[in-house]
Amino acid sequence: MNRSSYYDWLKREEVVRSKSNRLLLTEIRAIFNKSRQTYGAIRITKELWSLGYKVNKKRVARLMHKDGLKSVHKRKYKVCTTDSKHSYPVSENVLQQDFSTTAPNQKWGSDITYIRTDEGWLYLAVVLDFCSRKVVGWSMDSSIDAKLCCDALGKALVKRKPPEDLIHHSDRGSQYASFDYRRILKKHRMTPSMSRKGNCYDNSMVESFFHTLKVECADRQQFASKKEAFIVISNYIEQFYNNWRRHSALDYLNPVEYENMLLLAA
């Protein structure tokens, strides 16, 4: 090949690469925005693979850096304090920080967090399946009482219809130690388990979800009303977190995909 032909070939290759990068960057921007600007190069690469693109993480990272796309950094999350000064009975810590499972509906975790709005606090109670990290039940209200937690658990039971002896773990707050909550656990033959006093690591998987929720959603905007917060948070849980957000611990599948994979493998 003579010199002029070689340079013509280089120019054509450059045009092809440039066009390919522009098309790929369009997809990267779309995924980045759909992820609420939270996905980094690894998760975006995994999403591109699912769309049929044959691309490596280094190329995605290079294009993101060039375009100024930087994922939201996780900030330190302050765990909410628990009202454990009550006269209700407290269950032993059956879980013992063993979050391992082989299938859904073996171990659930529950907890409450606070959402700030201009109208005051909105409280969110969730029930998380430790197998898939899926939020299987949730409830929001202006009151932080046993009913809030009972509603979340009730939704989880209706949706999942779990087998007997499922381990249900929570902190030792008055809501979870209340007569009404314990009655539901007993009715459905669930094994209650509670964290040790002042040890947030005993329920760290639910705390991790709250951390993710705060960083990716709740702390990124100021809610003018409780109704607005309810709509945004419920959409985050049902549409984004459960059905779309990829988890590194799930081999970068979302919770619904992971459960479907286990179901097919069974």
Image: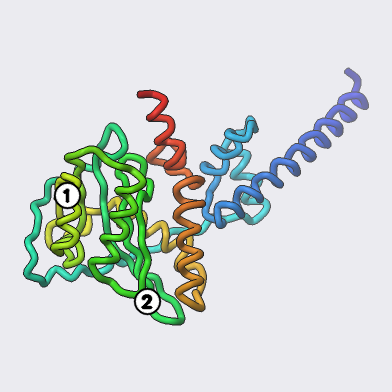
User: CB of mark 1 within 8 Å of CB of mark 2?
Assistant: no
Give the CA separation, mark 1 to mark 2.
Answer: 32 Å
Residue placed under numbered mark 2 in the picture: 121
Is 15 rendered above or below residue 31?
above
Q: Nearer the viewer, residue 252 or 158?
A: 158
Q: Is residue 89 visible?
A: yes
What is the quadrant of the N terminus in the image?
A: top right
Seen as rendered, the residue at the extreme bottom is 119
Report the side of 89 relative to 146 (left or right). left
Q: Amino acid at mark 1?
A: Lys
Q: Quadrant of residue 19?
A: top right
Residue 198 appearing in the image: no
Q: Secondary structure at mark 2?
A: strand
> In this rendering, is residue 223 above or below 96?
below
**Label placed on residue 187:** 1
**Left or right: 72 with respect to 168?**
right
Name the residue: 42% across, 59% down: 213
Residue 99 is situated, as x and y percent measured from the top left of the image, at 24, 42
Percent x, y of residue 90: 9, 59
Q: Nearer the viewer, residue 233 or 50?
A: 233
Answer with the quarter of the image where residue 175 lies. Answer: bottom left
Which residue: 20% across, 51% down? 169
Which x, y percent locates residue 249? 38, 40
> Tag 2: residue type?
Trp
Q: Residue at x 41, y 75 (%)?
A: 116
The numbered mark, 1 or 2, whose residue comes first in the sequence reads 2
Q: Residues within 10 Å of mark 2 (few under 14, many from 20)?
A: some
Residue 36 vertical placement versus 131 (above, below)? below
